[in-house]
């Protein structure tokens, strides 16, 4: 019996420049995520049912529409979410199709489901955008409201063993992730992964508040202000002190 086409749940896609990897990117946002991060700005991607059932070929056909433009810009394709590794079979086939087109590929993930990414999948990944939520387990659970930091640590070291370039993302939330000891722990973890090319300290924002309202949900951080320049400078310096390139 011949297997049918691989189908995934795709929430949306967009074209971005300088945000989701190098150059101009075709970014596919896959639906479904096991985490419930307090600062999440896309609660509309939490569930697989919120996406549209899409075959691998349908998504690759959409990507082909932008193929020449992407190549000229030195960009590529980024699979984001939600959490793309909730759909590893679909991701594996999409990545393989992108590589057949000669496109640069990036995987945007928390690493929480990193064990689901087999070596075949990762062989077609040129860059991992790794969202490290915190540096200690207690803060990780507070941020994500589930899960364990250990899976992300394990995945980060596996990426280093495979020689995969990594861009780390760390969301700075006053009163939640900004404790100096927590930042030091993240910085120490990142410094121990020798394929990390850069660290992006992302200031928390409330731009997703309207999505929570539309879904009838309370935004957990509605009363929290974005970090000021002094806090951002302090945190970026903590990473730079480990010899890391910080943005």
Image: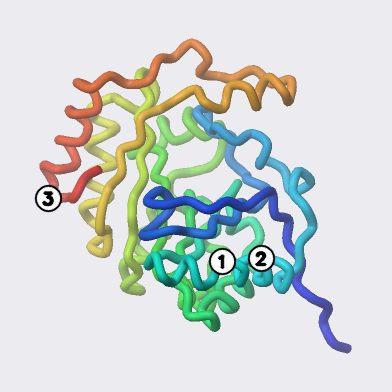
Q: What element carries label 2?
A: helix
> Which of disc 3 and disc 2 is earlier in sequence?
2
- Residue 70's x, y, as percent? 47, 66
Residue at point 50% right, 72% down?
Answer: 68
Q: Is mark 1 on a helix, strand or loop?
A: loop
Tell me the crowding category of disc 3: few under 14, some 14 to 19, or many 20 or more residues within 10 angstroms, Cα based: few
Indicate the quadrant containing the N terminus: top left, top right, bottom left or bottom right. bottom right
Q: Which residue lies furthest to the right in this view?
A: 1
Indicate the quadrant containing the C terminus: top left, top right, bottom left or bottom right. top left
The label number, if any, that marks residue 141 in the structure image = none
The label number, if any, that marks residue 62 in the structure image = 2
**According to the image, label 3 marks what residue?**
243
Badge 2 vs badge 1, beta-carbon distance below 8 Å: yes
Whether residue 136 is visible here, answered yes or no, is no
* Label 2 – label 3 distance at C-alpha: 40 Å
**According to the image, label 1 marks what residue?**
66
Residue 20 vs 3, above or below: the answer is above
């Amino acid at each position: 019996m011949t297997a049918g086409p691989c189908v995934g749940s795709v929430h949306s896609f967009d074209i971005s420049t300088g945000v989701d990897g190098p150059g101009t990117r075709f970014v596919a946002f896959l639906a479904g995520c096991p985490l419930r991060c307090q600062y999440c700005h896309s609660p509309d991607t939490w569930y697989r049912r919120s996406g549209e059932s899409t075959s691998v070929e349908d998504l690759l056909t959409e990507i082909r529409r932008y193929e020449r433009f992407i190549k000229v810009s030195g960009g590529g394709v980024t699979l984001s979410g939600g959490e793309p590794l909730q759909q590893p079979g679909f991701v594996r086939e999409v990545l393989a199709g992108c590589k057949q087109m000669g496109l640069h590929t990036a995987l945007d993930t928390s690493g929480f489901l990193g064990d689901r990414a087999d070596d075949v999948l990762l062989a077609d990944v040129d860059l991992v955008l790794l969202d490290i939520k915190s540096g200690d387990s207690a803060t990780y659970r507070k941020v994500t409201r589930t899960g364990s930091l250990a899976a992300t640590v394990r995945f980060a070291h596996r990426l280093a063993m495979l020689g995969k370039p990594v861009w780390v993302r760390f969301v700075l939330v006053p009163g939640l992730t900004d404790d100096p000891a927590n930042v030091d722990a993240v910085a120490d973890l990142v410094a121990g992964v020798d394929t990390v090319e850069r660290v992006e300290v992302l200031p928390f924002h409330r731009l997703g508040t309207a999505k929570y309202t539309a879904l009838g949900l309370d935004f957990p951080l509605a009363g929290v202000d974005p970090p000021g320049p002094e806090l951002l400078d302090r945190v970026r310096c903590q990473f730079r002190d480990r010899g890391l390139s910080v943005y």
